Amino acid sequence: MIPEPANLKTRLGPLELRTPVIAASGTFGYGPEFENVTDIEYFGAVTLKAVSLEPRTGNPYPRMVETPSGMLNCIGLENPGVEVFIKEKIPAARKSGVPLIANLVGDKTRDYQELAAILESENDLAALEINASCPNVDHGSLSFAMDSNILGELVAAVREVTSKPLIAKLSPNVTDILPLAEAAVEFGADILNLSNTFLGMSISIDSRKSRLSRDYAGLSGQAIRPIALRIVHQVASKLDIPVIGTGGIYDTTDALEFLIAGARAISLGTVNFIHPNRARDICDGIQAYLSKNDLELTELTGSYLGPASCQA
Ligand SMILES: Cc1cc2nc3c(=O)[nH]c(=O)nc-3n(C[C@H](O)[C@H](O)[C@H](O)COP(=O)(O)O)c2cc1C
């Protein structure tokens, strides 16, 4: 266990976490998958793999391909549906003792609302996260997170039926993130998670086909880190809402960059496949940095000092 008293507690609005390191949805299964390969208690929370009302088989294979400094995936939000999620996945995950966050997906606003209403009575869920990157079937391939009116409606609908801390996880695939972040805040999100994967593509020159079963897929890993960091700073420096920084975080330095840019917590995604015990390394690293610089975590958050300048 982390030595007490831990100085890594962080508050994200209504959600208090023991450490600022969260497992990102889809990269940590439902928790037990990582039982023997990680010190799970170093995570302040685990975001479970997405859940939808009905089971989803996901996209056909191949669904993952490595890229320089990252990976592309088009898993397609495969999951066993909310019934199995409640009966099997939550009870298994709760054994870790780490707060659990459900990641909600759907085709329509009312799918998310129905899901949130069903999950409201699940006492083992510390928070609900809206994965707003899903395509909205009423608007073609446009995802909920690409239009501030659609996103606002979605957040409001879920807010109406839940009293749990509500996280809106936004897509980075937009020209300007601010109007979307503002809409999520205005319509009731308590926390923003910035952000999901970037759309990318990979072509086999032999077949001249995609290396994946879709044309486009989600790019994650180190390649996206500077862009995700910029998005976190843009939002955290303008809006008064706690932000979780997500995108390409692999080590302590990366995590510190996001905290300095204004994130109150960070989440680890792709790195879990490579270094499943990174939460522990990063917690230790943040603690060491705080001690060395005589800082509290709250003082570090958002302490970015602006552009570098050359000394004459
Ligand atoms: C294999 C895989 C599956 C994912 N599944 C989900 C998911 O179910 N729900 C979700 O909101 N994000 C999902 N994501 C996105 C991650 O949670 C995270 O936002 C993204 O990968 C960026 O972080 P990273 O660069 O640290 O991986 C998935 C990512 C990967 C790589």
Image (cartoon, grey):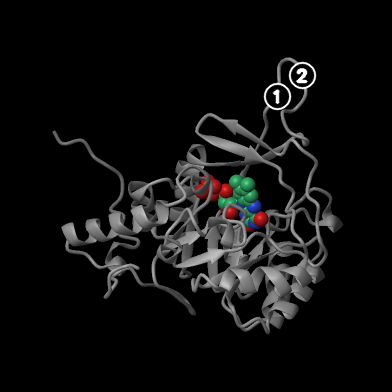
Q: Does dot 2 land on a helix, a strand or a loop? A: loop
Check the image and name the residue furthest to the front: 36
Can residue 171 be seen from the camera position used here?
A: no
Which quadrant of the view contains residue 153? bottom right
- Rendered position, 110 above or below 32: below
Circle 2 residue: 208
- Rendered position, 75 above or below 287: above
The residue under the point 42% across, 45% down is 250
> What is the x, y in percent for residue 229?
45, 49
Q: Residues within 10 Å of mark 2 (few under 14, many from 20)?
A: few
> What is the x, y in percent for residue 136?
79, 57
Query: Which residue type carries mark 1?
Result: Ile
Query: Which residue type carries mark 2?
Result: Arg
Left or right: residue 160 versus residue 21 is right
Badge 2 vs badge 1, beta-carbon distance below 8 Å = yes
The residue under the point 75% across, 53% down is 78
Q: Nearer the viewer, residue 263 or 271?
A: 271
Left or right: residue 46 versus residue 104 is left
Identify the disc placed on residue 43: none
Check the image and name the residue furthest to the top: 206
Q: Nearer the viewer, residue 174 or 246?
A: 246
- Rendered position, 15 above or below 260: below
> What is the x, y in percent for residue 55?
81, 61
- Rendered position, 163 above or below 156: below
Q: Nearer the viewer, residue 250 or 143?
A: 250
Circle 1 residue: 203
